Amino acid sequence: MDFKKLILGIDIGTSSVKVSLLDSCTSKSIYAKSVPTMAKINPSHQKGDEQDVVNILKAMKQCLKSPGKIMEKVKAIGICGQMHGIVFWDEKFVLNFWDSEFISKTDTFVSNLYTWQDARTDFQFLAKLPKPHSHLKAYSGYGCNTIFWLKENQPEILSNFNQCGTIQDLIVSILCNQGKSVMSTHNAASWGYFNVTDCSWNIDILTEANFPVHLLPSVVQPGINVGTLYETIYNIPKGAVVGVALGDLQCSVMATLTTMTDAVINISTSAQVAFIAKEIETQCDSVEYFPYFENHFLAVAASLNGGNVLDSFVRSVFSWVSALGLTITEDELWNRLLHLSPEENLTPLIVNPLIFGERHNPTTYGSLINVTNNNLTLSELFSGFCKGIINNLHKMMPREMLLKAGIQRIIGSGSVITKNHIIKKEIETCYNLPLCVTMSEDSAFGAALALLKNNPSLFN
Ligand SMILES: Nc1ncnc2c1ncn2[C@@H]1O[C@H](COP(=O)(O)OP(=O)(O)O)[C@@H](O)[C@H]1O
Ligand SMILES: O=C(CO)[C@@H](O)[C@H](O)[C@H](O)[C@H](O)COP(=O)(O)O
C-alpha cells in the first residue's frame, strides 16, 4: 500500500519502549513494535527506583530501526512516556548525542532516571516539605520531590547537570538537538509544585525552600511543536516535526477513547482507571485531576500496583523453582500461569496486592486473607493477585463514581489487560459495565494521534 504521510508515535514505558506508525489519511496504525528496556538498575538508595538511560535509548533505537524504508514517509513525531520521573543531563549530552564517539562517554553527562516508583522521599521526608499551591498533591516519586531529596542528600547530582526533564523530554531534546529542556503541562503537573490553572511552577514557594528553580524546564501546552528532527535517522527525514512530550496516561486515553461516556482502564507496569472531566473535583483522596487536552482534565485513580505486582509474583515463583534445583524460563512461567485452569474453592483465597503501597496510603502493604488447607495453590495465588489488582482499582474509583460521571462503557488497554483473561473477567465483575478491550492501540499510537489532531494542516 502507498502511504503518503505517516506520524511516528513513541512511548517510553517503565518496562518497554513502544513505537507505532499512524497513517494520517485513515488515522489507523499500520505498524507497531515494542522492545523491553531492561533498564532497571540497583538504586543508590534502598527505597529508590532507578533506570539506566542508555539502556532506554538503546531500546528506542532498536524500535526505530525495525520499520525500515517506510520511515521515509514520516512527517512528524509524537512522544510520550512514564510520568512523574526525572532525569538530569548536561546540554553537551544532547548537543553531542549524534556524534558516535561521544556515546561511550555518556555517563558523565546524564544521570540515571529516578522513576515514578522511587520511594526515597518517604512519609517523614515529605512531611518536611512546603505545601504546593496546586489542586494536585506532590507524592513520592514526583520530580520536584526527588530534587528536594537530592538537594539534601546528593547535591552533586544537581550541580553536575544543567538540565532536567522526564525521560520523554530528554528524548525530544535529543531528536531536535536542543540543549534546553521544554515540557508539557502533562509532565509538569506530574512533578508536583505546578499550578495547572495559570500554567506555572510554584516559584515563590520553591525559592523560599531553597529549591534550585533554575533547573525547572519551561512549560508549554500539549499539542505545541517544539522543534524538528535534527538529522535523518533510521530513514526518518531530517526536518520532521517533533511535538512536546506528553504523558503516557493522557496518550493511552487519547488512543482508546471515542466518547465522553467511556472510561479507560489501562494496565501495564502500573494501573489506572480514568475518564475525561470538564471540571476538577477534590473530594476523593485516591482520584486526581491531571491536565488532558483543550482545557479538559483526566479524572484518574492511578495505582502503583499493576503489572509490576504480577511481575514480582512471577519473579518469586521463578526463584522458588530455581531454589528447588528445577529450571524454567521466565517466559514459559508467564505462559503457564496465564493458562492455568481456574479453580472453584468454597473459601477462595483473597489477595490484597498492595506490595508497592499507594500514593494516598503509602504505609499499608499487601496481605493474604482466607488461607485454608486447600486454597494455597499456584492457580489461586496467581488469580488472587490478578483479581486483587482490579479490586484495588475499584476501591480507588468505584463503579458509582463512573455512573455519576455518566460513564456507560469501559475500554481496556495495556499489555497486561490484553494478555490476561482473569483480569478482563474481574473488570466486568467489579464494574458491571460493558468492557471493550483494544488489542493494539496504546500510548505510542495516542502520541501520534494527538500530534495529528493538533496539526491538521501538516497533513493536508
Ligand atoms: N513474558 C511475559 N508475558 C506476559 N506478561 C508479561 C511478561 N513479561 C512482563 N509481563 C507483564 O507486562 C508488564 C509490563 O508491560 P509493558 O506494556 O511492557 O509496560 P510499560 O508500558 O509500563 O513499559 C509487566 O509489569 C508484567 O506484568
Ligand atoms: O502514575 C500515573 C498517573 O499519576 C500513571 O497513570 C502514569 O501513566 C505513569 O506514567 C505510569 O505510572 C507509568 O506508566 P507505565 O509505564 O506503567 O505504562
Image (tube, grey):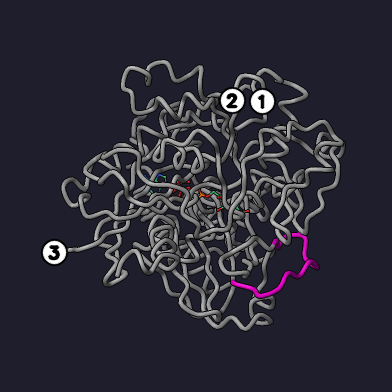
Residue linked to disc 2:
43
**Residue 331 % position (x, y):** 34, 41
User: Residues at badges 2 and 1 in contact (C-beta under 8 Å)?
Assistant: yes
Mark pair 3, 2: CA separation: 47 Å
Q: Which residue type carries mark 3?
A: Asp
Residue 280 within the segment the image draws in magenta: yes
Q: In terms of image quadrants, where is residue 437?
A: bottom left
Mark pair 1, 3: CA separation: 53 Å
Q: Which residues are magenta?
A: 276-288
- Structural crowding at the residue carrying mark 2, measured as other residues with C-alpha within 10 Å and reported as few (<14), some (14–19) or many (≥20): some
Residue at figure coordinates x 44%, y 20% from the top left? 106
Number of numbered discs visible in the structure rendering: 3
Judge whether 36 appears above or below 270 on screen: above
Q: Which residue type carries mark 2?
A: Pro
Residue 83 within the segment the image draws in magenta: no
- Structural crowding at the residue carrying mark 3, measured as other residues with C-alpha within 10 Å and reported as few (<14), some (14–19) or many (≥20): few
Q: Quadrant of the C terminus?
A: bottom left
2 vs 321, nearest the viewer: 2
Horizontally, residue 324 falls left or right of residue 218, namely left
Residue linked to disc 3:
2
Q: Which tag is nearer the camera, tag 3 or tag 2? A: 3
Residue linked to disc 1:
46
Residue at figure coordinates x 59%, y 66% from the top left? 274
SS for callout 3: loop
Q: Which residue type carries mark 1?
A: Gln
Judge whether 405 appears above or below 14 on screen: below
Judge whether 166 appears above or below 224 on screen: above
334 vs 97, nearest the viewer: 97
SS for callout 1: loop
